[in-house]
Amino acid sequence: MSSAEETTSQILTTHSVGATVQVVIDTLFARIKAGTYPVDTRLPSERTLASELGVARNTVREALDVLAGQNVIHRRPGSGSFVKYRSDPKPEASYSSLAKEVSPLDHLVVRGILEPELIRLAVINMTPRQIEELDEILSRVEAVRTDPGDFIEAEEDLYRKIAEGTGNPLLHSCYELTIEACRLSYRTALRRRHLTPQRIQDYQKRYNTLFNAIASRDVESAVEFIKLHLIDEQKLLLQEI
């Protein structure tokens, strides 16, 4: 085991597990902490990890359960395990303070600045694997029928994956701040009121169109889509003012 992996056992030793399970926990956590498995990405399957690490699938499953209990990963039935841990967590207080100053209009203005460039770079730079992961997130978006909370969570993950796909970590971080400011302000509550089943279905069709443009590397169509989408969001906001 590498020195980086050895240090992680100090974090998770409160769990009573077997020695082999602990080794798997340490190994996976070290990889997550080092960025081998970045935040919001899906871990390899239990079968793949078991084969790679030379252990039984039950051992991997128990290790993943521990990591999920520590909020290092999030397990989604039928979809796999996704990384939640951030190596440089941002102070919640700073977001809360900022959110108090961010109005829905402020938020939309920043989106109007960031998202066209976000989309343009993602179309150019996303790897085939990232596009595949984006498709999986889109499936989650499309699976929502009526729950605004579930839809917003899946929608945020969709934008996070696009931001990651730009290949620009600073732009990715800026957009993450936009998402957090939205969540901590009353903008999210406002959106929940408008996310009727019909509007959810409309957004699902829109995001399918956006995904097709990204997957086909059609920069012009993808950027034009997001600009029109933002105009519609602005119209919706103006109804509340």
Image (cartoon, rainbow, N blue to C red):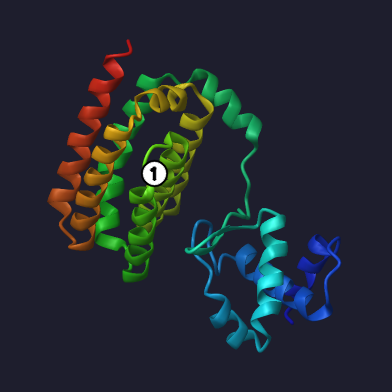
Viewer-proximal residue among 2 and 228: 228
Q: Residue at x 48, y 64 (%)?
A: 78
So how many labels did they put on this image? Answer: 1
**Image quadrant in which the N terminus is located:** bottom right
| 56 relative to 160 in the view: left or right | right
Q: Residue at x 19, y 45 (%)?
A: 223
**Image quadrant in which the C terminus is located:** top left
In the rendered view, tell whether residue 57 sits above or below residue 219: below
Residue 45, horizontal then vertical, whole percent: 53, 75
| Extreme residue toward the top, this view | 241
In the rendered view, tell whether residue 235 sits above or below residue 197: above
Amino acid type indicated by mark 1? Glu
Residue 118, horizontal then vertical, whole percent: 31, 47
Looking at the rendered structure, the secondary structure element under dot 1 is: helix
In the rendered view, tell whether residue 175 sits above or below residue 55: above
Viewer-proximal residue among 81 and 98: 81
Q: Residues within 10 Å of mark 1 (few under 14, many from 20)?
A: many
- Residue 174 visible in the displayed image: no
| 43 relative to 171 in the view: left or right | right
Q: Residue at x 27, y 15 (%)?
A: 238
Residue 107, horizontal then vertical, whole percent: 39, 27
Viewer-proximal residue among 232 and 142: 142
Q: Quadrant of residue 24?
A: bottom right
| Residue topped by disc 1 | 155
- Residue 181 visible in the displayed image: yes
Q: Residue at x 24, y 38 (%)?
A: 202
